[in-house]
Image (tube, rainbow, N blue to C red):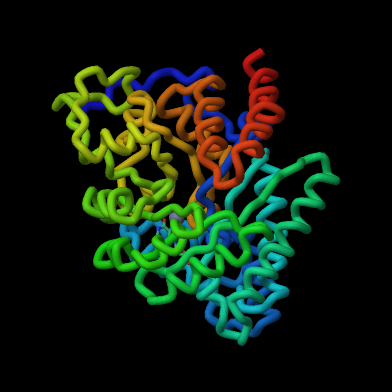
Amino acid sequence: MTTSMPPVSPFGPDPDPALFALAPKVVLHDHLDGGLRPQTVLELAEQVGYTKLPASDGPSLATWFRASADSGSLVRYLETFEHTVGVMQTAGALERVALECAEDLANDGVVYAEVRFAPEQHLEAGLTLDEVVEAVLKGFAEGEALSASAGRPITVRCLVTAMRHAARSREIAELAVRFRDRGVVGFDIAGAEAGYPPTRHLDAFEYMRAHNAPFTIHAGEAFGLPSIHEAISFCGTDRLGHGVRVIDDISLPEDADFTAHDFHGAKLGEIANYVRDKRIPLELCPSSNVQTGAVASIAEHPFNVLARLRFRVTVNTDNRLMSDTSMSKEFAVLAGQFGYGWADFERFTVNAMKSAFIHFDERLAMIDEIIKPGYAVLIG
Ligand SMILES: O=c1[nH]cnc2c1ncn2[C@H]1C[C@H](O)[C@@H](CO)O1
Ligand SMILES: [Zn+2]
């Protein structure tokens, strides 16, 4: 791969993320336990007597998360969650974190969010799975109400995640279906990918399919094509969490420039074709992918190749705390690297909204009433 001069962004070479705050944004892949405010981690630790935090003030803690997550390994990246999950063990803590999550996303101009977390990781202080989900949904509803009254309306829905190294996925899928009319719109599996293929959790996915309920699978992040193949072909996933390694099934000319405008010489293999033909959404998380070593750098991120080849790409944060990011920052990074303008960001946002797990009429209303008018103002 070669990288020539990156295309010039209409926003300048190193755009200010604040430029993107006004654009309506949709996030489909954002972890509740990966997006806490550093100050909240400190305050909750104090309240619940959690003594293992690696820093004692907000800025140092923020730096610690970002630096520790920068290891180039998904397994080491995931170790940082010990400290966020550690302080999210009571209903009050869960509710506060969910409320602040909704507020932070709304303040960044996110209009629709699907936020995920693994209820099975929040049972240490005696809550039941149902109580955990109820507390989180309560916090989201409060955050939505506060944001609406502050003139920043947002819709937040929840995905419940099962940890792929554990054995509770069927139970979590049942939880998702039990709460389907109360704000939980889907199911997911996450955690270390190598050694834990999606087919380990086939009964959970079969349960979801039997109940006509959608799900996504973290696949093609730390492990490559076999994981994507299982997720789409054996498990029947509706979306791919990351899915970034689908690039391994696309052959490009030896000297291809990942920042180019077109990729006419690209040859898609069977898996890549299937993902594109079926319009399977890719929940791409550029900054996170660099941190976990799924890609070497933003310049070498396949986002642009996949976008230009018209895969259904979406832009996501993954873990705002660990990556010190936001949707506006991810847009800024992509604009600076690949030269995208408002029309591109509108397309990625519409892609995301089309791929959401709420009902078709609700998706359409968000696109027609909020997203398109919002970008029309920006495009001018
Ligand atoms: O990017 C990720 N890949 C795999 N697992 C992840 C990623 N980000 C967060 N997780 C894990 C750690 C969290 O504790 C869990 C539930 O949100 O999901
Ligand atoms: Zn994730």
Residue 253 spot, x, y in % from top left: 16, 24
Q: What is the count of numbered marks? A: 0
Quadrant location, the N terminus? top left
Most distant residue in the right direction = 149
Residue 361 spot, x, y in % from top left: 64, 36
Q: Quadrant of residue 201?
A: bottom left
Between 28 and 81, the one lying in front of the other is 28
Between 7 and 92, the one lying in front of the other is 92
Q: For this view, does 89 lie left or right of residue 268?
A: right
Residue 86 can be seen, yes or no: yes
Looking at the image, is 22 positioned above or below residue 132? above
Assign ligand 1 to one image quadrant: bottom left
Looking at the image, is 25 positioned above or below residue 187? above
Most distant residue in the front direction = 210
Q: For this view, does 328 lie left or right of residue 136?
A: left
Q: For this view, does 351 lie left or right of residue 362?
A: left
Quadrant location, the C terminus? top right
Residue at x 39%, y 51% (from the top left corner): 237
Residue 66 spot, x, y in % from top left: 47, 57
Residue at x 64%, y 24% (from the top left corner): 372
Residue 60 can be seen, yes or no: no
Residue 160 spot, x, y in % from top left: 53, 63
Most distant residue in the top direction = 380
Q: For this view, does 232 lie left or right of residue 356?
A: left
Between 258 and 102, the one lying in front of the other is 102
Residue at x 61%, y 31% (from the top left corner): 20
Residue at x 50%, y 31% (from the top left corner): 348
